[in-house]
Amino acid sequence: MRIDIITVLPELLKSPFEASILKRAIEKGLVEVHLHNLRDFSIGNYNQVDDYQFGGGAGMVLMIEPIDNCIAKLKSERNYDEVIYMTPDGDTLNQKMANELSLKGNLIILCGHYKGVDQRVRDRLITREISIGDYVLSGGELAAAVLSDSIIRLIPGVLNNETSALTDTFQDNLLAPPVYTRPSEYKGDKVPNVLLSGNFPKIEQWREEQAYERTEKRRPDLLK
Ligand code: 6GU
């Protein structure tokens, strides 16, 4: 998989890909992540990428021409499965979307900023609009990092233990059950006996019950 991220703040998107699982996925060659500074596609003598909005109102809008030029250059080099725009008014990201996108080959992710992008970008160039939840961030960069992480960890070979994504919260629309590690007793609080029993069918049954109970209590909406 290859992910090309277009942003006015590439520095904000460096570190997420330089540590832990995402770093290892890149080192293993399972995914390539390329950051593109929209400023490199600016127009005029002032490195302009944004402008005042027609009709008046506070806040700058990212112009269509630099974005169109950047996307056209990328598309001249390879085919893309999706051109995603990160925006709080997009479809809310969930595990099903992450699963779907992890099966794609090449993705472009455009980060919105300020008041967003010229509507004609969205009409002409974008295939999918994604939000990461009902709250407002200063820009799409952190949302793009969240989306990328949710996708990349699902690519086969990225996680050490291939089964571990299968037991994640939200897989099968259930929250994950509680987990424990040593010591088996801490200040009087004991780990549930069943986990120390070595009876693996029984442990599996306990985990399923706990996952269901936790989901019923915390996220009953997932069970509908
Ligand atoms: Cl994708 N962008 C911004 N600016 N804020 C958000 C978001 C995206 N998703 C949730 N809040």
Image (cartoon, grey):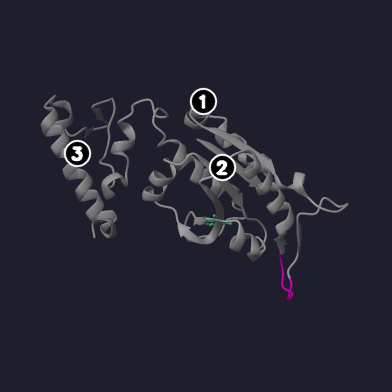
Disc 3 marks which amino acid? Arg
**Real-space Cα distance between discs 1 and 3?**
35 Å
Quadrant of the snapshot with the C terminus: bottom left
Q: Position of residue 150 (x, y in %)?
A: 44, 42
Left or right of residue 151, residue 47 in this image? right
* The CB of the residue at mark 1 lies under 8 Å from ligand 1: no
Q: Position of residue 207 (x, y in %)?
A: 19, 39
Left or right of residue 37, residue 160 in this image? left
The residue depicted at 67 percent of the width and 41 percent of the height is 36
- Is the Cβ of the residue at disc 1 closer than 8 Å to that at disc 3? no
What segment is highlighted magenta in the picture? 54-59
Relative height, residue 67 to residue 150 (above, below): below
**Real-space Cα distance between discs 3 and 2?**
43 Å
| Residue that numbered label 2 is attached to | 79
- Is the Cβ of the residue at disc 3 closer than 8 Å to that at disc 2? no
Disc 2 marks which amino acid? Asn
Q: Most prominent secondary structure in the magenta stretch?
A: loop
| Residue that numbered label 3 is attached to | 207
> For the residue carrying disc 1, how many other residues have a C-alpha within 10 Å: few (<14), some (14-19), or many (20+)?
few
- Choose mark 2 or mark 1, whichever is in front: 2
